[in-house]
Image (cartoon, rainbow, N blue to C red):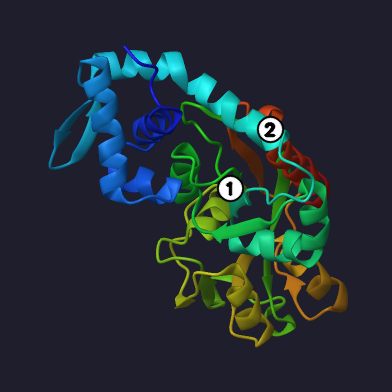
Amino acid sequence: MSRPSLDHLRTFVTVYRVGSVTGAAELLGISQGTASAHVRALETQLGYALFDRDRAGVSPTPRGIELAREVASHVDAIEDAALLSAPAGAPVRAVQLGGPAEILSIMVVPRLDELVDAGRSSVRLTFGLAEDLLDALTHRMLDIVVSSVQPRRRGVTAVPLYDEEFVLVGAPRWRGVDLEEVPVVSYAENLPIIRRYWRSVFDRPPQELRVVAVVPDLRGIRSALLSGLGMSVLPTYLVRGDLDSGALVALDAPEVPPLNTIFLATHGREVESNPAVGAVAAELRRLIR
């Protein structure tokens, strides 16, 4: 039997990880037909099926799982070796970074040149919710995720990155007013951040609050509060300058402010095997603090 094509093995491993021929094709930059042809050619060469196919997509057969366990690390190593041996000046694959729009926009984007210099590669940012970004990381569509929840995914490595502190804030006009009388600007209808604050600080749900606006962007909430609209719970890094200037005031001063740990998540040992990803991850630890 002839030796399997590296391209066919790469496509097989990507389909195995993504769970979709279409998704793997997009990730590899090839057509769906080409990806399907690679997998079928490999199956023909090996003499057994690698995936079961149905309307929902593909799922690996027992022999497909066994092959993936045998070859995936070797395929990754070959690609890493090719990256390391690329001649000076050769284009390097962009590092794909995902995270909350607010944290990346405020802590990273203003110093994006330092991130690019550290990784010696271009950087692509993706904003979104933590679970969606972690799904993309699991499927290798992202290299690094700054996650607002602790990742609990097989194959994902995560380390604590930053503890964001939350503060209940509003315009000075609301200082001294009973909190239940102050209108609320929330991130979502179910008051996720405010509910966490109320349970942590007051040991009860925020049942008597009046929501006047829902703004699914913390920076937008800050702008609404600066206009005097009402109150909300925001991370301190976002309003530190406003608190210092008096444009916003803290409407509550708990002895222990609520905290949420931000995690730096990567796929497996990517920070060690991929120099660009490792350098960008190290620089993120310096920038986000």
Residue drawn at the location 40% of the way across and 66% of the way down: 189
Horizontal relation, residue 189 to residue 46: left or right: right
Say which residue appears at 26% left-offset and 20% top-offset: 45
- Asked whether residue 36 is in view, the answer is yes
Of the pair 60 and 158, the residue shown nearer to us:
60
Q: Which residue is mark 2?
A: 271
The secondary element bearing badge 1 is classed as: loop
Q: Which residue is mark 1?
A: 148
Dot 1, crowdedness within 10 Å: few (<14), some or many (≥20)? Answer: many
232 or 51, nearer to the observer:
51
**Residue type at the position of mark 1:** Ser
Which mark sits nearer the N-terminus, 2 or 1? Answer: 1
Q: Is residue 73 above or below residue 177?
A: above
Q: Position of residue 125 (x, y in %)?
A: 61, 59
Q: Position of residue 37 (x, y in %)?
A: 26, 38
Rendered-image quadrant of the N terminus: top left
Residue type beneath disc 2 = Val
Residue 268 visible from this viewpoint? no
Residue furthest right as drawn = 244
Picture residue at 83% right of the left edge, 72% below the top: 241
